[in-house]
Structures are given as structure tokens and as C-alpha cells.
Amino acid sequence: MEEKLQRLISECIKGNQLAQRHLYDKYVSVMFGICLRYAKDADSAKDILQDAFIKVFSKLKQYNGHGSFEGWLRRVFINTALEKFRNKTPILSLDDKAELTIGEVPENIISELSAGELLEMIQDLSPQYRLVFNLYAIEGYSHKEIAESLGISEGTSKSNLSRARSILQKRIISLSAMEGRRKKVNEG
């Protein structure tokens, strides 16, 4: 770990509010992006952000300097988001055979989507689908890790991922069709 970051963390552990503000400012935008992926809206993401930074500052002594500090932060933020949804929303257990399959979405459709449109689609997923989708597709967790983390079976994790993908694919295709119609009207 770079020496400057080590000093900043040491100062934060000592309770130096200026150092804590600097650490917050350094990571707030990246961590807010993570919170947005797990939240249903910006206000919920802000709640997760605040709770997670409180945890970061209270648990900073636990960071042992091994591995990436940002990776450690990400883990705190993801776990905070998971706790928030675990307490609010029961994760549905679905039959292992409930997997859905639909065709792939053409790449040109995805490339035309803005990051904001895609984020909004993910936020519109039900909490259980959003959690599994984010953990698997974005964070790279295995279904076993997701199952352990959320207290569900691996089959439920797979099923929820499949359903989330299906919903997202349908929304992307629908949005693309609407955009195509809009272009034709504007050209005609």
C-alpha cells in the first residue's frame, strides 16, 4: 500500500476528522456508484453510503494493509447493502428447475444504452433479483458465495440470476424497439 494512503488511514484511526473527510472525498463517488447498483433509488443509495462510511470509520483498525484498500472498502459497502436488504426483504427461494432461458440481446442494442439507462433498469429489478445480479454479474461472486451470503440455496441464486437477466433483456429489447420507432418518426 502506498505510504500516503497508509498515513491517511492511520490519521483516520486516530479520529482526525480532516483525514476522515479526505478519505471520504477520495472514495465517495466510486462507493456511491456501488450503492446505486444495490439500491432501488438515489435516496436508498445515500442511506447505504452513510451507513457504510460509518462502518468503515469504526472498523478501519481491522484493515490489516494486505490487499487493496479499495477492495476492502467495496466489501464493507456491499455487505452494508446486503444487510440492509436482508433485514427489509426476504429473499425468495425458488425451485432449482425454475431457470429461464431466452435469446441473447444483440450487442448493438447494448452499446446504444447509456450507463444511466442500464443502471435504472437494474434498480427497477426486485430486490432479490437485483442483489443476485449485482453480486454475480458485476462483483464476480460465485453462486455458492451468493447463497452463503444471502442465506439461500445455490439453485435459488441461479434462478434469480436467470430471471434478472431475462427481465433486463426484455427491457433492453423493448427500449431498443421504442428508440427505433422514435428514429423512424423523426426521419419521416
Image: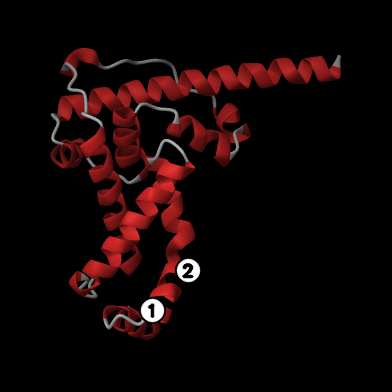
164 or 28, which is in the foreground? 28
Q: Is residue 4 above or below residue 115?
A: below
The N terminus, quarter of image: bottom left
Secondary structure of the residue carrying numbered label 1: helix
Query: In this rendering, would 93 be left or right of 50?
Result: left
* Residue 20 drawn above or below residue 147: below
| Residue for point 30% across, 46% down | 81
Outermost residue toward the right? 188
* Mark 1 lies on residue: 17
Q: Is residue 82 left or right of residue 179?
A: left
Task: Name the kind of residue labelled 2 in the image.
Answer: Asp
Q: Is residue 2 visible?
A: no
- Residue shown at 15% from the left, 30% from the top: 154
Question: The disc labelled 1 sits on which kind of residue?
Answer: Gln
From the viewer's perspective, is the residue at label 1 or at label 2 nearer? 1
Image quarter for residue 161? top left
